[in-house]
Amino acid sequence: MNHPEFTILMPCLNEEASIEFCMDEAAQYIRQSGICAEILIADNGSVDTSKQIALQKGARVIDVAQKGYGNALRAGIAAAKGKYIIMGDCDGSYDFSNLHPFVKHLRDGYALVMGNRFKGGIERGAMPFTHKYIGVPLLSLLGRLKYRVSIGDFHSGLRGFDREKALALFLNAEGMEFATEMVGAFARAKEKICEVPIVLRCDKRSGKSHLRTIPDGLRHLRLIIRH
């Protein structure tokens, strides 16, 4: 598939318990909606069977040697073939079978379409108390004040954007703070941004989350201050 309209991009690190489920949902949406799309897995050094599962399910897989959420996504954006990219974690917490709001708003000319978990709903146990009521709201508030943009959930892992416009921003964050950097960069470039409600589900990981609450929170904070 040389020129798909969309790339569904999933960063991956040891997600064998959930990657098949996520890919099945994405494939279901592609079939039912009729969009021309590829599924791209940016593997960040998995030592389990994640890559093999993805290849068996028909995804395109790239290897990203440099560790970090931002590094995986930046490599995925560079390698994507789609005009638009819809990215989401492949831990089962996001619903890839309901991507229509992202598709619609991207086609309508929005450069960045953010999923908002607080507007769509957060399943019981899907987000730690401190993240739900302190960390994400506080950092999102600081982001809104800094970048003058009305985004309520800066850290949502499900979002869609125009690939060429994203590349033109020269994003360089290596870790989880990439989520904030992207919103800030699109806002500073005066691009059209909107939010759509999404549901956050309990993930299907068999191991620990890749998120490190205090170190990653500080990385977000430092990035906002530095900008």
Image (cartoon, grey):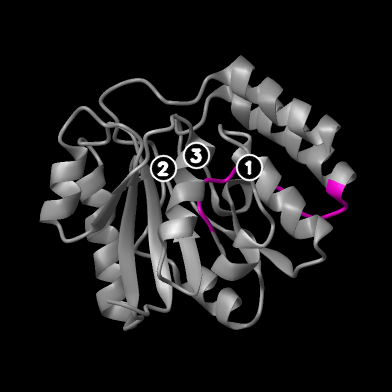
User: Start and end of the magenta stretch?
Assistant: 147-159
Q: Is 73 situated left or right of 155 in this image?
A: left
Instruction: Give me the residue at 31% from left, 68% from top.
Output: 38
Relative image position of residue 140 (x, y in whole percent): 74, 40
Q: Which mark is residue 71?
A: 3
* Residue 29 picture quarter: bottom left
Which residue sits furthest top?
Answer: 214
- Dot 3, crowdedness within 10 Å: few (<14), some or many (≥20)? many
Nearer to us: label 2 or label 1 = 1
Residues at marks 1 and 3 touching, judged by CB atoms closer than 8 Å: no
- Dot 2, crowdedness within 10 Å: few (<14), some or many (≥20)? some
Give the structural element (helix, strand or loop) at label 1.
loop
- Give the camera-side residue of 109 and 185: 185
Q: Measure how far apart labels 2 and 3 are at the Cα level.
A: 25 Å
Q: Is 82 situated left or right of 205 in this image?
A: right
User: Which residue is the site of mark 2?
Assistant: 201
User: Which residue is the site of mark 1?
Assistant: 172
Q: Amino acid at mark 3?
A: Asn
Instruction: Give me the residue at 64% from left, 67% from top.
Output: 165
Relative image position of residue 197 (x, y in whole percent): 58, 58
- Give the camera-side residue of 147 and 172: 172
Does the segment drawn in magenta span residue 151? yes
Give the structural element (helix, strand or loop) at label 2.
loop
Instruction: Give me the residue at 80% from left, 41% from top.
Output: 143
Nearer to us: label 2 or label 3 = 3
> Could you tell which of marks 2 and 1 lies nearer the N-terminus?
1
Main secondary structure of the magenta stretch: loop
Relative image position of residue 12 (x, y in whole percent): 34, 40
Q: Amino acid at mark 1?
A: Asn
Quadrant placement of the C terminus: top right
The reply to whether residue 153 is in sight is: no
